[in-house]
């Protein structure tokens, strides 16, 4: 699935989920090291656990962040 981000440096998040487990996450744009780190940390975790851990994380004075945008993407996926 592809998710267009809002309010962050990354432009898009691409992810694969199988049986409610995150198989892969790729950010398009953003801070490469940070987004790669997030991706590696969440692979193998359940969708609900990632949402619980990352939702509401802010980047500086911004009301959102790349981790929060991933949580929003997963919430959108879960509501389908």
Image: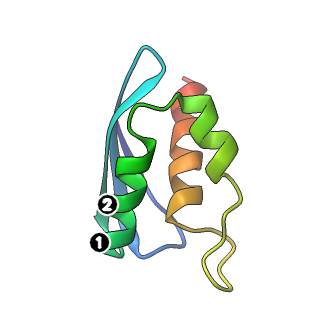
Taking 69 as reference, is 40 left or right?
A: left
Helix, strand or loop for disc 1? helix
Taking 71 as reference, is 41 left or right?
A: left
Taking 78 as reference, is 2 left or right?
A: left
Q: Which mark is residue 32?
A: 1
Residue, x 56% and y 68% (percent of image)?
65
Picture quadrant where residue 16 is located: top left
Q: CA distance from mark 2 to mark 1?
A: 6 Å
Q: Which mark is residue 36?
A: 2
Check the picture and name the quadrant holding the N terminus: top left
Q: Residue furthest bottom?
A: 61
- Spot occupied by residue 6 in the image (x, y as percentages of width and height): 51, 65
Number of numbered discs on residues = 2
Residue, x 50% and y 51% (percent of image)?
70
Helix, strand or loop for disc 2? helix
Q: Which mark is residue 77?
A: none
Mark 2 crowd level (few <14, some 14–19, many ≥20, 10 Å Cα): some
Residue, x 54% and y 23% (percent of image)?
80
Q: Nearer the viewer, residue 27 or 12?
A: 27
Residue, x 37% and y 63% (percent of image)?
35
Picture quadrant where residue 32 is located: bottom left
- Spot occupied by residue 74 in the image (x, y as percentages of width and height): 53, 38
Mark 1 crowd level (few <14, some 14–19, many ≥20, 10 Å Cα): few
Question: Mark 1 and mark 2 in contact (Cβ < 8 Å)?
Answer: yes
- Spot occupied by residue 7 in the image (x, y as percentages of width and height): 54, 72
- Spot occupied by residue 53 in the image (x, y as percentages of width and height): 66, 47
Check the image and tell me how it is coloured: rainbow
Q: Is residue 75 above or below residue 36?
A: above
């Amino acid at each position: 699935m592809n998710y267009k981000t809002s309010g962050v440096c990354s432009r898009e998040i691409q992810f694969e989920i199988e049986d409610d487990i995150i198989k892969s996450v790729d950010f398009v744009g953003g801070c490469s090291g940070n987004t790669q780190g997030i991706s590696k940390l969440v692979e193998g975790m359940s969708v609900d656990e990632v949402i619980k851990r990352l939702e509401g994380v802010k980047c500086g004075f911004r009301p959102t962040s790349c981790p929060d945008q991933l949580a929003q993407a997963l919430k959108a996926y879960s509501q389908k």
